[in-house]
Amino acid sequence: MAATRRIAVYNGKGGCGKTTIAWNLAMGLARRASTLLVDADPQGSLGHWADWAERDGHYAIAFCEWAAFDERLQQHHRYQVYDCPPRLDEPEIDGILGQADVVLMPVLPSPLDLWASRRSAELLRRLQGRRPGLQAFFLLNQVEPQSALSRASQSAMETMGLPVLPVRIGRRAIYRNAAVEGLSVYHMGQRATAATDEMERLIEEVLK
């Protein structure tokens, strides 16, 4: 079996679309190989989403909550995606992020949201100091069509020490519609083509 690839989606600031990205990322990875989705967010949104998808016959991933996570599960899944809690409690977050090879930090493309993510970026840099092989990236999320990042946004990112992935996730109604139906964008047909293209480009980046 090929080496496991473990991807955490984390930002200590809530409201950045972390859970939606984790869900759709896991569904896209499951089209390639066996995938485990781990819900470490105490809100438990992914558990409800997964139950709904399984009931409707669209469930293509294995799922568990962090409290029930067993490292032996890693032996059976090529890909693992962790939806992390929106916290800055370093010991707890270290325990979750300590499983990851790659950390994606979704941020909204505005200076205020980026500055609010500064402490999360600092935590990731400290973790990289202890784990030099850990990769961590900003992921711009809910980007408006044809919008340009302001100079202030660009400046904010440059001071935080984490690279920005070239792919941007758009602000699209299809992500919300899929969530309402308990599905991923991969199950939404032609109307989700742009969204699935975004997710595929994201997957290409995290699998490099």
Image (tube, rainbow, N blue to C red):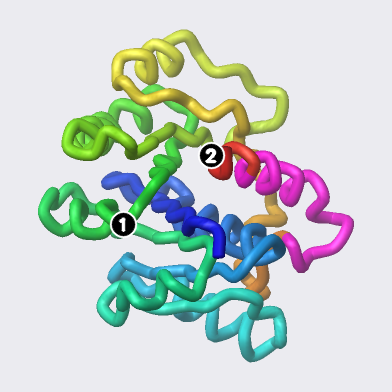
- Kindly tell me whether residue 177 is visible in this rendering: no
Single out the residue that lies furthest toward the right. Answer: 190
Q: Looking at the picture, how far across and down is residue 85, in whole percent?
A: 29, 59
Is residue 194 shown in magenta? yes
Above or below 63: residue 206: above
Question: Which of the 4 quarters of the picture holds residue 128?
Answer: top left
The magenta segment:
186-203
Disc 1 marks a residue whose amino acid type is Gln
Q: Residue at x 61, y 17 (%)?
A: 148
| Image position, residue 50 (x, y; %) | 54, 78
Neighbor class of circle 2 (other Cα within 10 Å; few <14, some 14-19, many 20+) is many
Tell me where residue 60 appears, x and y as whole percent. 65, 76
Q: Residue at x 64, y 80 (%)?
A: 59
* Residue, disc 2: 141
Q: Earlier in the sequence, mark 1 or mark 2?
A: 1
Task: Describe the element under mark 2 as helix, strand or loop.
Answer: loop
User: Along the line of sight, which residue is nearer the eye, 121 or 171?
Assistant: 121
Residue bearing the label numbered 1:
99
Q: Nearer the viewer, residue 177 or 106?
A: 106
Say whether residue 82 is magenta: no
> What is the quadrant of the C terminus in the image?
top right
Q: CA distance from mark 1 to mark 2?
A: 24 Å
What type is the residue that disc 2 sits on? Asn
On the image, the x and y values in percent for residue 191 come to: 84, 55
User: Between residues 155 and 146, which one lies in front from this camera angle?
Assistant: 155
Query: How many numbered marks appear?
Result: 2
Residue 8 seen in render: yes
Q: Quadrant of the N terminus?
A: bottom right
